[in-house]
Image: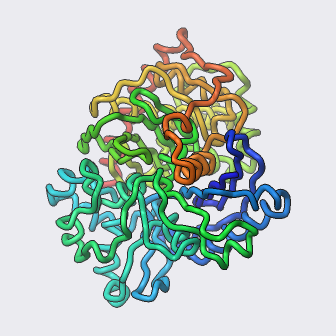
Amino acid sequence: MYLGLDLGTSGVKALLIDAGQKIIGSGHASLDVSRPHPGWSEQNPADWIRACDAAIAELKASHPKELAAVKGIGLSGHMHGATLLDAGDQVLRPCILWNDTRSHAEAAALDADPRFRQLTGNIVFPGFTAPKLAWVKNNEPSVFAKVGKVLLPKDYLRLWLTGEHISEMSDSAGTSWLDVGKRRWSPELLAATSLDERHMPSLVEGTEKAGALRAELAASWGIASGTPVAGGAGDNAASACGMGTVGAGHAFVSLGTSGVLFAANASYLPNPASAVHTFCHALPNTWHQMGVILSATDSLNWLSEISGKKAGELTAELGDVLKAPSGVSFLPYLSGERTPHNDSVIRGSFTGLAHESGRAVLTQAVLEGVAFAFRDSLEALKTAGTILTRVTAIGGGSRSRYWLKAIATALQVPVDIPADGDFGAAFGAARLGLIAATGADPLEVCTAPRTDATIEPDVPLGGAYADAYQRYRALYPAIKGAMA
């Protein structure tokens, strides 16, 4: 058996697979996000440990014998978080999360240093880790002075699991401290934020062994002491391993809290001006590019909350047949936007509202707005040298066939729906645990699931969608000017 642990923003998932990669069982425990000030987003790392322990306990209750047969563990987690530890590995403050935008001024200052884009292949986004440390230095100097180690969220779980300070390439590529082409920490970039390599964990590839399970936890969970823990991956790279999106030309669209258009690459193809993320993949000698939108299903959940209707009820009101855009447009910038704007200050909007704009029209506009945000990412990927001819859909929002039809029509590419199964980050983490424990060929393990159905673009509505996308494109500069 092999265990995948995924630290998500809203919870920890523990997933158990056998040697044939059949899912045996899972456990889950929820997490909350603290927002003490506008633009802030934090979690207490102690809650990650509590949730991980609870998820394992749930799995042990239902599958004790199978859990006892675990031979490898893989880790996945939300990226970019700044988990600050002192010299004794005590947490100094709540972790600043990926969707926290307080460090926008520090990010702009670092991004103005040409070495950052040159070495990382990326814009320094406010959500990345390095500007968060610059913010702490500027605003909490007594905390900064005590920093002994900076760990990414899943790597704090690894410290608890193994006692080791280790990270891997895919997650570390989102810090703004990694030389992404050479797959190593950059002393220059660390020095620019008053840090050095002593503050960083050591680095391995995601498929390599990165510590062994401590005896105390092994005894509690009923797993063999010394079970190897893989390097693992950041959540999107882990999802890609779960989906088999590891070869050049393979791509997926993820409709989760945030939205991701992810493409695997056989070489390093940076183009920071496009606001595309260019990161190391979890597999050696492999990279990937991502267009990232910050509020995907979050946009529908926002509408759900204010309308008093569940998200599924809102999409059900639209039926199954794709409708022509109504003229109402929605910008899904509820917490700023990454690709293609790199704008932490911009906020969302509805435009074109009229007396007849009922709830269903607003829902339709939200789904289209997210679809057009993915189209922005598709265009950004093109400028970065990646052309996509089809994508596979994952994430909770992919349960809506209407939404997938809107995305296929907005992107003008077919959207494949995988056969029933869990191919997300926890599954990818379990695969990496299998590889690290057995030495199996990553390409033979990280295969794609069977396609259950394909959603083709709606040809008759292609022109109407193209026109609506141009209206959508025109709104950002207008809204930005109004908010300046």
Q: Quadrant of residue 126?
A: bottom left
Q: Position of residue 314 (x, y in %)?
A: 72, 38
Q: Quadrant for the C terminus, please.
A: bottom left
Residue 51 against residue 482 in the figure, above or below: below
Image-quadrant location for residue 60: bottom right
Q: Nearer the viewer, residue 47 or 170?
A: 170
Residue 230 in the image: state x and y as whole percent.
Answer: 52, 57
Q: Is residue 320 above or below residue 129?
A: above
Estimate the x, y position of residue 102 in percent, counting from the top left.
38, 68
Q: Is residue 255 left or right of residue 453?
A: left
User: Which residue is most to the right?
Assistant: 62
- Residue 168 shown left or right of residue 421 in the figure: left
In the figure, 226 relative to 360: above or below? below
The residue at the point 35 percent across, 30 percent down is 379
Compare residues 28 and 406 and report the one nearer the observer: 28
Residue 373: tell me if it is visible: no
Residue nearer the viewer, 327 or 105: 105
> Residue visible at 29% across and 36% down?
267
Determine whether 124 is above or below 281 in the image.
Answer: below
Q: Residue at x 57, y 19 (%)?
A: 324
